[in-house]
Amino acid sequence: MTNLFELQKQDLRGDGRVVIYKRAPKSGSTSSKYQMRISTPLSTGYHRSSTKTNDLNEAKRIALNKYDELYAQVAAGNSLVSKKFSIVLDEWVADYQVTRQSVQKASNLKITTDRANNFIKTFFVEQAGNPRVDAVTESNISDYTNYRYAFEISPNTIRRELSILGQVLSFAHSKGYLRDTPKISLPKKVKSRRSTFSKEEYRKFYRVLRRNAHNQTNKRNLRRWFYLRDYCLVLANTGARVGEIRSLRWEHIYKTTIGAEERRVLQLKGKTGRRDAAINAGAERYLFRLYDFRTNELGHPPQLSEPVFCNESGREIGSYKKGFDAACEQAGVLYSTDGDKRSIYSLRHFYAHRRIIDGNVSVYELANHMGTSVELIQDHYGPQLNVQSSFRISASGHNQDRTTSHYPF
């Protein structure tokens, strides 16, 4: 039976490894250029490409030379069907978007693919010359790390980017584009202290929130600042993560009594699973205030399944970042004394600092309440833990010397 795909076929070695042919006609005529189909020992699949000539003898020479080139490539541990790095990266991005869209937030999905396209692709195409993916070496990866360091990128960010690169190379391996994935050495992870507020900075921040929530004449702005204020207050009085509070529903709040004290407890669900966390005593009034506001806005109590922090139509609010930044800037506390820009997560860290310093709680209790590990608490809040421990260790029955002299300490 005639092969309609490969016409005028010639097996140059007699073993089927080097075959030249012409493509089947698409418009009533045979293609004038010879194509080649090549396979080599120690590999699977075929290499197909054009010889770019219609001369039979020249096509034979080109095909046999290509066989020798590919055989040497495979013998060196590379793949027969390898592709350019940029093509593989594009394939990975498309695959990643499809396979991750059901389990990853669209915003996080975009961050990952943007890093792949904006940084990894730029380096390997423009700086490394867009090599075949099976030609990417550990030296190339080391060069990428140094390339990113030159832009004063933090080691933790570079670690995330190299993790993405590792996924791209693993994807290439699964597709048969390379036989072995090169080793990726990650920069040492930096355990940075979390930016928070001092008591006085937090007071300044809260005064701005309170003032803006009360001094709005525009209904839309009034609502926006009202919700931002109580959103920040709830975060600062629970130590919850941003996503946990954002997805909080009225049905996730319940009342409990321990001894003679009545408290409100939030059922939080985040990256570490579900946990129940009580809001600070007295802070339940922020929840009452939100519930009353929403009731007045609707003309009836909200559905228990509605998000606590919602827009007028009842949909979960995506982000308060712009409002938070504006309030911090107005209060003069947008940046810490170390020059670090504060984020909404600074409210979670403020809660942890105050519990450690004022609450006299154990590391284990705090970690359990905040849904994190004891190690993370120790890494990020070490100085505060040291102060707390020092106070207990240095305690005595003697009164503190109340000198009236002035000292620089």
Image (cartoon, rainbow, N blue to C red):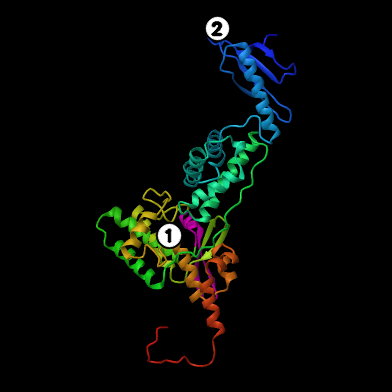
Q: Position of residue 43 (x, y in %)?
A: 71, 30
The residue where tag 2 is placed is: 29
Q: Which residue is more in the foreground, 361 or 52?
A: 52
Relative to 136, say whether 16 is above or below: above
Relative to 56, say whether 131 is above or below: below
Q: Position of residue 282 (x, y in %)?
A: 43, 71
Residue 373 is labelled as: none
The amino acid marked with disc number 2 is Ser
> In which quarter of the view is residue 175 placed?
top right
Residue 36 in sight here: no
Q: Position of residue 88 (x, y in %)?
A: 56, 35
Asked if residue 397 lies in the magenta stretch, the reply is no
Q: Look at 53% across and 59% down and name the residue there.
A: 267
Residue 210 in sight here: yes
The residue where tag 1 is placed is: 344
Q: Which residue is more in the foreground, 407 or 250?
A: 407
Relative to 335, say whether 43 is above or below: above
Q: Position of residue 265 (x, y in %)?
A: 51, 65
Instruction: Give the magenta range.
Output: 240-265
